[in-house]
Image (spheres, grey):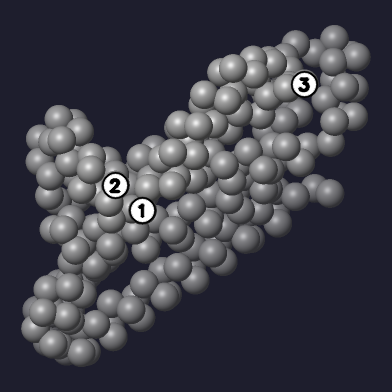
Amino acid sequence: MSPAMFDLLLRGLKETLIMTGVSGLLSFLIGLPLALVLVTTDRGGIFEAVTLNRVLGLVVNGLRSVPFIILLVAVIPLTRLIVGSAIGIAAAIVPLTIAAAPYFARVAEVSLREVERPLIDAARAMGATRWTIVREVLIPEALPGIVSGFTVTLVTLVGASAMAGAVGAGGLGDIAIRYGYQRFETEVMVAVVAILVVLVCGMQWLGDRLARALDHH
């Protein structure tokens, strides 16, 4: 492999990490509060508001049901409005976040619902406020599962960022399409796949270790 191609792959890896990292952070900051609202406003929840819960659930399910490649194209006007362009790394972050936030919200919701009800009831019996229960009971108890779910979300984002390369978003996906597919440079395609496999395995390994470290049960 030529030095120029090696440099291109390094640039593609950097762009992929930026897209995955920024959209992952945004999806966490949006998805976790969404999950908390979905859990606490459900019937019997500490902030019970069934109508709000159902409406929010429909919105989350609606966004999750749209295939990413369609979402990528559908939100182009919004992407242009936010970042001023429909191509490039910044433009890819918008649809990646819109796709990942509701996905992570549902994954985190599962972990939050697994928190044992007696723990919540005990906290209420001791006079804890509802916000204290969220901070001191729900989030800490569900944290290992939340971390595992976020790891899965990041892995999904790596694949989605590669798909975004098909429409000029940059990153490893763009290199694979332009050089590996359109120019039939097999070694480039193999290199991109190998880098993605290593990246995903590394993320999963780190996420699993962190989740185990946080699990005190």
Q: Nearer the viewer, residue 94 or 55?
A: 55
Q: Neighbour class for label 1 at 10 Å: few (<14), some, many (≥20)? A: few
Residue 191 x, y percent position in the rendering:
28, 82
| Contact check, label 2 and label 1, Cβ < 8 Å | yes
**Number of residues whose C-alpha sits closer than 10 Å to that of mark 2, classed few (under 14), some (14–19) or many (20 or more):** some
Q: Quadrant of the N terminus?
A: bottom left
How far, Cα to Cα, is label 3 from label 2? Answer: 34 Å
For marks 2 and 1, give the CA distance: 6 Å
Which residue has dot 2 on it?
A: 71
Residue identifier under label 3 = 44
- Is 170 situated left or right of 143 in this image? left
Secondary structure beneath label 1: loop
Query: Residue 149: where, in percent of width, then height?
Result: 58, 50
Q: Residue at x 75, y 50 (%)?
A: 215
- 3D distance between C-alphas at marks 1 and 3: 33 Å
Foreground pick, 141 / 63: 63
Q: Is residue 201 shown left or right of residue 128? A: left
Q: Tell me if I can see residue 150 in this picture.
A: yes
Q: Is residue 200 above or below residue 190?
A: above
Residue 4 at what x, y percent from top left?
A: 9, 79
> Label 1 belongs to which residue?
67
What residue type is disc 1 on? Pro
Q: Which residue: 35% across, 42% down?
A: 97
Mark 3 element type: loop
Q: Nearer the viewer, residue 84 or 139?
A: 84
Q: Nearer the viewer, residue 35 or 191?
A: 35
Which badge, 3 or 2, is on the more N-terminal residue? 3
The answer to whether the residues at label 3 and label 2 have Cβ atoms under 8 Å apart is no
